[in-house]
Amino acid sequence: MIVAPVGRTTVTADDLRAWVRRCGDLVTEQARALTELDAAIGDADHGANLKRGMAAAVEALAASADMPDAVLRTLAMTLISRVGGASGVLYGTFFLSMADATRGRDSLDLRTLTDAIGAGVSGIARRGRAEAGEKTMLDAWYPALDALRASTDLVPALEKAAAAADAGRTATGPMLATKGRASYLGERSVGHIDPGAASTALLLRALAEVMGGRAS
């Protein structure tokens, strides 16, 4: 059991590696569910692709440099090369943008982490030419980012962000998809959870669990 000291205020490179390991665990557990979501409105491969990418990232990070930006950059490049479809590019862009925003820092406090996640979300929006309300992963990222910006303490902030991402995931159900492959379905996309929003919620839950000392 990874036990986080009470009052954790920073995220280190080791924490980020633990985050990736926990992401790998949760994605593996939910791979079939993610693929089923994707089968309804996409290519039916989101869970399998992300599972493969996270497993490769865990392996790659075993030898990464001991700086947050190096961990994030290795993660990004691994996902770009190993995760197929748009999700690999979008998650890769997210983590590359985070790496750029944290260059040279040996740890990340809440403000720095929030700014880095904000940079990542902006990267997704630019690359995907998307905005809130279009039934994409952004509909989980944006409420999570708002929760982080409204908080002052790291661990509670991450718990609130994870809860906000879960709510954002659920909120994609009644939305009409206007971006990506799901948009081709028109009205038939209504009633289905967006798989990218679902995997985003898993990633944020993993970070909250690691920093809260609840990840095994």
Image (cartoon, helix red, strand yellow):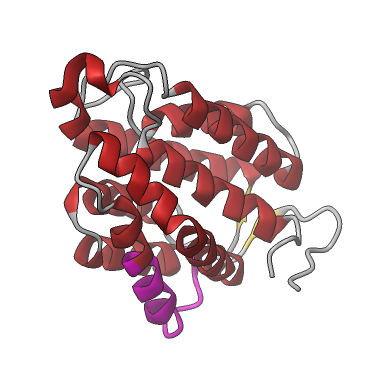
Please provide percent x and percent y for residue 83.
25, 60
Stretch of the chain drawn in magenta: 52-68
Secondary structure mostly seen in magenta is helix
Q: Is residue 64 visible?
A: no
Farthest residue in the left direction? 184
Residue plotted at (37% across, 53% down): 95
Please provide percent x and percent y for residue 29.
51, 61
The answer to whether 6 is drawn above or below residue 150 in the figure is below
Indicate the quadrant containing the C terminus: top left, top right, bottom left or bottom right.
Answer: bottom right
Residue 173's image quarter?
A: top left
Inspect the magenta stretch and tell me whether residue 67 lies in it.
Answer: yes
Residue plotted at (44% across, 68% down): 71
Q: Is residue 10 visible?
A: yes
- 47 and 140: which is toward the camera: 47
Inspect the magenta stretch and tell me whether residue 41 lies in it.
Answer: no
Left or right: residue 178 versus residue 165 is: left
Farthest residue in the bottom direction? 63
Left or right: residue 164 versus residue 118 is: right
Please provide percent x and percent y for residue 30.
48, 55
Residue plotted at (68% across, 55% down): 209
Indicate the quadrant containing the N terminus: top left, top right, bottom left or bottom right.
Answer: bottom right
- 100 and 95: which is toward the camera: 95
Please provide percent x and percent y for residue 2.
74, 71
- 212 and 181: which is toward the camera: 181
